[in-house]
Image (tube, rainbow, N blue to C red):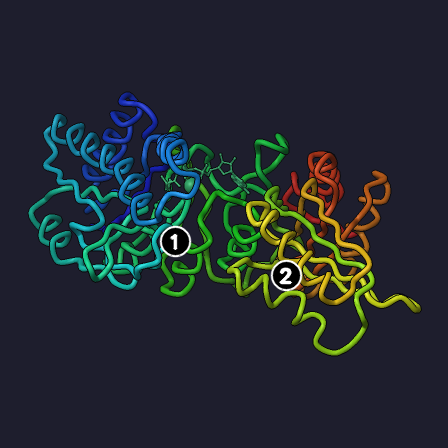
Amino acid sequence: MALIVQKYGGTSVGTVERIQSVADRVLKSVQRGDSVVVVVSAMSGETNRLIEMARSIQSEPAPRELDMLVATGEQVTIALLSMALQQRGQDARSYTGAQVPVLTDSEHTKARIKSINTETIKSDLAAGRVVVVAGFQGVDKHGQITTLGRGGSDTSAVALAAALKADECQIYTDVDGVYTTDPRVVPKARRLDRITFEEMLEMASLGSKVLQIRSVEFAGKYNVPLRVMSSFEDGPGTLITLEDENVEEPVISGIAFHKDEAQLTVKGVPDSPGIAYQLLGPIGDANIEVDMILQNVGADDGADFTFTVHRADFDNALKLLRETAEKLGAREVSGNHNIVKISLVGVGMRSHAGVASKMFRVLSDEKINIRMIATSEIKISVVIDDKYLELAVRALHDAFELDTPEVSLN
Ligand code: ADP
Ligand code: ASP
Ligand code: MG
């Protein structure tokens, strides 16, 4: 008998009919003899609908109230799923994050899980019940309702699996696994049988929203066996694993992209110590995360400095940069939010040279200009104009032959 945590995302519980199918799927596991804890998201579109309503009243709603509001989405689906299970003769109980309790810090709208009390869940399981837990939400030590950031139900599921020492955490979604790239953009994308935690973490951080970043971090840290699979059809899905020394890793496992970045440039700043700190200090102080950074030193008229931030922070970052640039006597400040970041990810890159030059050649053949480049041990990212996103991802997917399991470097 295994203990399984199953998470169903928004599309999988998007209608009452779909909730009925989820109940059937949960029941199948129970009939196989497994103990099942289910984590659900809100119905698809619901969290967005709630946020829009809030913003129609206040442009920047208080985070506490926003959490109070959006947490209702998941409260609907836990109750409906429990009813559907009970209707099938299966004893089931729903719990909000606060009832479990899933204890978090007090950072409303982006809280982190600190601990989970598994006592109630364990005694329900022992009594033969299916336990249905609201994803995305928790409670802080003062009893305030918190949420874990968009896509946070993945993290709720993995954290519960870690706390319960579950045999597997299954993430059921609207695709049948993790693909070489977003199958909505590249129809030829191929499902991966397995991907390492490290690669999945890079893919998620670089824009593949199939799993929330934090959930992959958690799974890696607590070694939770994690599988992404379809809630609409049966299949093996994708297993996220530790690196296996006996298996030859492909050079490139996948291509991720991020549409939500924006680029800021300041030209003609003095080329002297402390400049990067002076330019980026106020941005960091305003809690704006800086992603890629590039500095060029010109022949005589100082340095040029370019960096990227999340598109939502663009206006604020540009305003701050203008203020600093004026103080420093810089020549020009400009911004561009029509850019995207595309990244190749693969642990096999560690032992293979030539990936970067091949990437640049492919983009050059397509006459796509590269604005910025960043590399690390297992990834290469480029920033290009957003109008070339699909062309670039498809050309790279073809050139690296990601639609076939073997990868060539020629
Ligand atoms: P859920 O509501 O179940 O949490 P999400 O929309 O958060 O589902 O995640 C699933 C989506 O992730 C897919 O529909 C797909 O478009 C997208 N996606 C992005 N990159 C990938 C990838 N590499 N593999 C699979 N899906 C991906
Ligand atoms: N309902 C939340 C969201 O839309 C959490 C989740 O779906 O994982 O972000
Ligand atoms: Mg999701």
Which-is-in-front pick, marks 2 and 1? Answer: 1
The quarter of the displayed image where residue 221 is located: bottom left
Q: Position of residue 234 (x, y in %)?
A: 38, 32
Question: From the viewer's perspective, is residue 213 above or below residue 208?
Answer: below
The quarter of the displayed image where residue 339 is located: top right
For the question of whether residue 236 can be seen, the reply is no
For the question of whether residue 215 can be seen, the reply is yes
Q: Which residue is mark 1?
A: 110
Q: Residue at x 73, y 43 (%)?
A: 396
**Cβ–Cβ below 8 Å for labels 2 and 1?**
no
Q: Position of residue 280 (x, y in %)?
A: 63, 65
Left or right: 134, with 408 as reference point: left
Amino acid type assigned to the residue bearing label 2 in the image? Ile
Question: CA–CA distance between discs 2 and 1?
Answer: 28 Å
Q: Which residue is mark 2?
A: 378
Amino acid type assigned to the residue bearing label 1 in the image? Lys
Left or right: 98, with 379 as reference point: left
Crowd band around label 1 with a 10 angstrom C-alpha radius: few (<14), some (14–19), many (20+): some
Q: Residue at x 24, y 29 (%)?
A: 24
The quarter of the displayed image where residue 71 is located: top left
Left or right: 171, with 329 as reference point: left
- Most distant residue in the right direction: 299
Q: Residue at x 65, y 52 (%)?
A: 318
Which of 240 and 324 lies nearest the eye of the viewer? 324
Question: From the viewer's perspective, is residue 161 above or below residue 20?
Answer: below
Crowd band around label 2 with a 10 angstrom C-alpha radius: few (<14), some (14–19), many (20+): some
Which of 242 and 53 lies nearest the eye of the viewer? 53
